[in-house]
Image (cartoon, grey):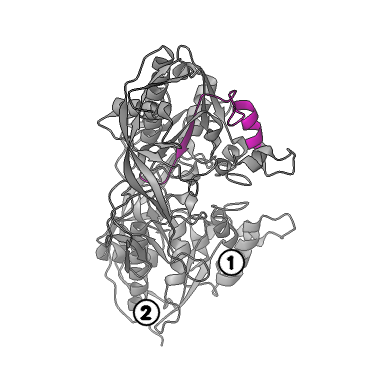
Amino acid sequence: MERVLFKPLSQVAICGGTHGNELCGVYMLKELPRDRSGTFSLTTVLANPRAVDTCQRFTEKDLNRCFTDTLLSDLLTEDSPYEVRRAQELNALLGPKGSEATMDLVCDLHSTTSNMAICIITHLNDRVGQHLFKYMREKIRSAPVRLILLTSPLSEGYSLDCLGKHSCTIEVGPQPHGVLRADVYNQMREAVDRMLEWIESFNSGTVFEGGEVEGYSMVEKKDYPRDPETQELTAVIHPQLQDNDFCLLKPGDPVFMTFSGETIHYEGDELYPFFVNEGAYYEKNTAFVLGQKQSLLVPSISVEKEQ
Amino acid sequence: MSSNNVVGFDEARRVAIFGGTHGNEMSGVTLVNLWLMNSGEIQRRGVETKAFITNPKAVEKCSRYVDTDLNRAFTTENLSCPSGKDLPYEVQRAQEINTMFGPKGSPEAYDVIFDLHNTTSNMGCTLILESSKDHFNLQLMNYVKKAIAPASCPVLLNEDPCLKYATVRSVAKHPVGLEVGPQPQGVLRSNIFEAMRIILKHALDFIELFNEGVEFPPCTVDVFKVSERMDYPRDDNGNIVAMVHPNLQDCDWEPLTPGDPMFQTFDGKTLPYEGVGSVYPTFINEAAYYEKQQAFVTTRRETLAANAIRKV
């Protein structure tokens, strides 16, 4: 596979508090070195300050679903949700999405109540994001590091990180929302430090060798069993699935337990569950996500030298 | 009163089980909703058991509270002030609950209220006691502890007037708090849900036996008595500058000795505990307590003696 060249990553943004109760990112922004000399400028952004103030995921609408082309170009009125307005502000600051002026890399910091350790989320065609994952996986020993691949094109994205030419969301867990755990914070900090290290090294001319990486791409979402009239839950994640993110789920495996103690078994293809029992996903009708594991051949990359 | 004397109590005929006092503590919300549909599991001979959602608006929003913390709202001032729609929602609610299950401090008040809570702290199944002199509650908690042994069921005693607060359960003659964790807010975990259910089953069994006339002999109950609230280190602007140390995180009920790591700054420096003597920390890193300036509470171990009790 031929080596691919990319322009230097001169403008990098790290965002935290996109969900106001995911505290690692909120607290980390203040600790990141901003007055740094080097090959790139670093902008840190508190994405949803109102939600951070009240320690909620969002105030009116999930900010991390507001970056669609439609919502970014919507005419704002008095009734526009705060997060739609804020998304347009962030688009002006870091974007505009899809243009040449946009940030070279946007990294968004998140935490989850699911037992997912460190996950790097990037796009199927984003070689920079994939190399960031590869580097972190090689260097980080304190926790598993996994890759989640988004298969839709960057242009169809709805999340904050698609404001960059390259994107990398760092998701760490398990951590309750509204809680700051030192062990989870330290893991996220290590991931961010390794990312900044890689960017500096890449911009300075290092050739990063390619190779095979393994990632998970979402196939479907499973909701909780619910009462057809009230929509209230009638079962909870089974103890044998709880905390077992990324352990292969086979037909017949327990997935839910009803309140009267009966087990509900999985029916479907052999797939990998993640975001198991994420607190914010009850209202999104998601008990867990199912993904397939895929191998990806990533080319070597290096910076395109100026003529 | 020597421990040879049997203390008589009226039969505990009216018992309430409260869920949703904090709307995002899901085990209690789920259990109470189940029992409102089908109360068979909580029925006992000689007991009228009522399951009740105390803060329905907070439950609907899946938030701890709407205007103010319901579990701090049962002060004399709140309960006696003129009612009205201008009052914070939870103060109105406190007055309604006091009418339905109280009045607090009167002979008409409910005999026992179990208030179901979850915590993000690793507290296991904790029973919360508001008075060291409540022999009925001490005997109930002794019964529950023995029933679930060898699994542990710590008892947290919070009776210091400077540290205790006006809880929803304080309306009853015998208030019992159940705090089960760790569970994130807004999340329902199977193991936590089942653990809370089992504790309640044993507690209701005790009440049934008591009402049938069983005499419970004198006993001792080991408790953890709340001693001090410890806040996070903060800067001059009130911002948190350190996190609960990884060595302390999840170590509820384990001894913390002077010199042990307590907090970790964001650049990795350890701040040690510098108190006098060993303490037993709990409510370590409870999400809801960041706004109450509390990283954890320290407790000291005590053994309480309970007289024999019998129905009169």
Q: Amino acid at mark 1?
A: Leu
Q: In this view of the protein, can residue A256 be seen by the observer?
A: no
Comparing B263 with A143, the one in front is: B263
Q: Residues within 10 Å of mark 1 (few under 14, many from 20)?
A: many
Label 2 neighbour load within 10 Å: few <14, some 14-19, many 20+: many
List the residue tagged with mark 1. A90
Q: Is residue A20 above or below residue B32?
A: below
Residue at 41 percent of width and 61 percent of height: A125
Quick one: quadrant of the N terminus of chain B?
A: top left
* Circle 1 chain: A
State which quadrant residue A158 falls in. bottom right
Which residue corresponds to mark 2? Answer: A203
Circle 1 — which element?
A: helix
Question: What range of the chain is rendered magenta?
Answer: B93-122
Q: Is residue B4 above or below residue A200?
A: above
Q: Distance of mark 2 from mark 1, alpha carbons?
A: 25 Å
Q: Are marks 2 and 1 on the same chain?
A: yes
Q: Amino acid at mark 2?
A: Asn
Q: Position of residue B210 (x, y in %)?
A: 41, 17
Q: Is residue A253 left or right of residue A287?
A: left
Q: Earlier in the sequence, mark 2 or mark 1?
A: 1
Does the magenta-highlighted stretch encompass residue A232? no
- Where in the figure is residue B171, as x and y percent of width and height? 56, 32
Residue A163 image offset from top left, x and y in percent: 53, 65
Residue B240 shows in the view:
yes
Look at discs 2 and 1 and give the one toward the viewer: 1
